[in-house]
Amino acid sequence: QKEVEQDPGPLSVPEGAIVSLNCTYSNSAFQYFMWYRQYSRKGPELLMYTYSSGNKEDGRFTAQVDKSSKYISLFIRDSQPSDSATYLCAMNGGRRALTFGSGTRLQVQP
Amino acid sequence: DAGVIQSPRHEVTEMGQEVTLRCKPISGHNSLFWYRQTMMRGLELLIYFNNNVPIDDSGMPEDRFSAKMPNASFSTLKIQPSEPRDSAVYFCASSSRPGLAGVKHTETQYFGPGTRLLVL
């Protein structure tokens, strides 16, 4: 079993929809939780990070962490075609190396 | 700032050949990470350096892989001999570790554009 599980999708939604992306994990040592966005043929870029449990909002993006359930989410409000990308969750704790989910491919249809 | 620079962007080689991937981290960053991305296994850490010293190489697949960081502005990942199963996108990332006061702020890893390697 992988340390971080993420549904690969693809997830296709109409423009303006609310998107929910999720990851589950098994390592209780994880303390930092991140979401990276990767456009086709590009490197991942950090969208948001959260320390421990709680919510964090940045514009149209909201990250949630529930450590008791070992479950993290990224919500995208008013999704745009430019949000079409692969979204990777990542986490670490104890060691600096990040453990990534496999990524969810999102397609926002205009 | 030019960001993390990787070269070459694409590499096609034949099985058994030596492959060298190069990375220039962001100036001022003291940590450098090499990742490999495949459809089957996703994004995996191969090795990372802190202040030019290899800290964790547990992700390096086997002895055919080696990485060096001779100075703060340059790193190489070498595969010798290469095999078809090494075909992947190899990413380099760099970061600047936060000070002790930033205990709730993990560092941001900035990724380069990647090198697409195809071993025939």
Image (spheres, coloured by chain):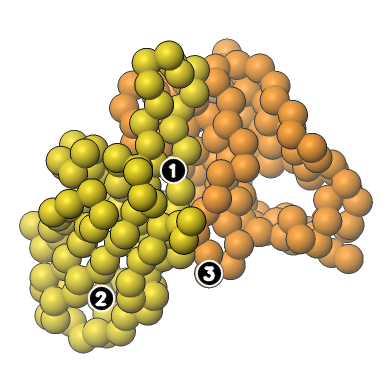
Chain colours: A orange, B yellow
Farthest residue toward the left?
A: B63
Mark 3 Cα within 10 Å, few/some/many (few <14, many 20+)? few
Where residue B95 sits: x, y (%)?
39, 41
Whether residue B45 is visible: no
Q: Can residue A55 be seen in this view?
A: yes
Look at the numbered disc 1 and give the secondary structure of its residue: loop
Residue sitting at x 31%, y 47%: B33
Quadrant position of residue A62: top right
The subunit carrying tag 3 is A
Q: In this view, does B59 lie above or below B112?
A: above
Q: How crowded is mark 1: few (under 14 residues within 10 Å), some or many (20 or more)?
A: many
Dot 2 corresponds to which residue? B84
Q: What element carries label 2?
A: helix
Taking A108 as reference, is A101 left or right? left
Mark 1, residue position: B109
- At x 46%, y 61%, the residue is B2
Q: Residue at x 70, y 21 (%)?
A: A55
Asked if residue A13 lies left or right of residue A103, the reply is right
| Circle 3 residue | A41
> Which residue is depicted at the point 23% across and 58% down?
B74
CA–CA distance between discs 1 and 2? Answer: 29 Å
Q: Which of A83 and B111 is in front in this view?
A: B111
Q: Nearer the viewer, residue A7 or A38?
A: A38
Badge count:
3
Image quadrant occupied by the C terminus of chain A: bottom right
